[in-house]
Image (cartoon, helix red, strand yellow):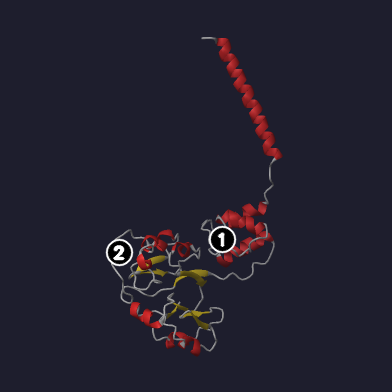
Amino acid sequence: MNIGAIITAVIVIAVLGLVLGLFLGFSAKAFHVETDPRQEQIVEALPGNNCGGCGYPGCSGLASAIVAGEAPVNGCPVGGQAVAEKVAAIMGVEAGESVRRVAFVKCAGDCEKAGKKYEYHGEADCRMAAMLPGGGNKGCSYGCLGYGSCVGVCEHDAIHIVNGIAVVDKDACGGCGLCAAACPKHLIELVPYDAKYLVACSSKDKGPEVMKNCKSGCIGCGLCKKNCPAEAVDVADFLARIDTEKCEGCGVCKEKCPKKAIVEH
């Protein structure tokens, strides 16, 4: 064994390590980017769900956008007013009013009200079932398939399959929007927590076709629109829709709906 060669190798490695360390240290200082300290404070104030419901990649992404002036201080749908006020205090601005939004499933066609075109024996996943002919086995091609893709992504245990359709517990819902993104039928919408009445249907079929497939589907008759004193209801593509900002919560639309497609939220 050549002791001299070993010592030389050790010295060379040590020198290389020293040179590399100095180079990395210099590079770190030369290319260091100062981070606004408020960004870290905002991240700590946010709920930490990293759900993406705000439209940014996680809480750090939202914090960065708030500091840059690209997102509002009340941009977190999960945190609500309490978190908005904390973030506003960090930024030195007013929080403004933060409207809590929760998920709502625009379908009431459960097993007792909606028929099926055929029996499905595949994977219990709405996204898989929706790829089949007719958009799935449900009689209404717009209806909830009920295989729980939304349930699987909910981090708040706020949505469950009840009698064949997805149902949201609005008090448990965090408003992150993950369920809406997972639904292949685009049936889930984020609505104000305090909304009084909503249309539990998404079908754009004409009345006779709707009645053939579902007992509670909107047939676009327009009685809700004609009788709404606040002019908060509109009908387009044979489907009623309620403007929650105009709605006064009188309940006339629900009373007049012959198919009971309008529900109290």
Q: Do the residues labelled 1 and 2 touch (CB within 8 Å)?
A: no
Comparing 169 with 30, the one in front is 30
Q: Distance between the residues labelled 1 and 2?
A: 35 Å
Residue carrying label 2: 120
The answer to which quarter of the image holds residue 121 is bottom left
Tell me the kind of residue under disc 2.
Tyr
Q: Where is residue 256 in the image (x, y as percent from the top left)?
A: 43, 88
Query: Residue placed farthest to the right in the image?
Result: 30
Disc nearest the viewer among 1 and 2:
2
- Residue at 58%, 10% in the rendered image: 4
Q: Which mark is residue 227?
A: none
Comparing 7 with 179, the one in front is 179
Please, what secondary structure does the residue beneath circle 2 have? loop
Q: Which mark is residue 55?
A: 1
In the displayed structure image, the side of residue 149 where residue 227 appears, left or right = right
| Crowd tier of the residue under label 2, counting other residues whose Cα lies within 10 Å: few below 14, some 14–19, many 20 or above | few
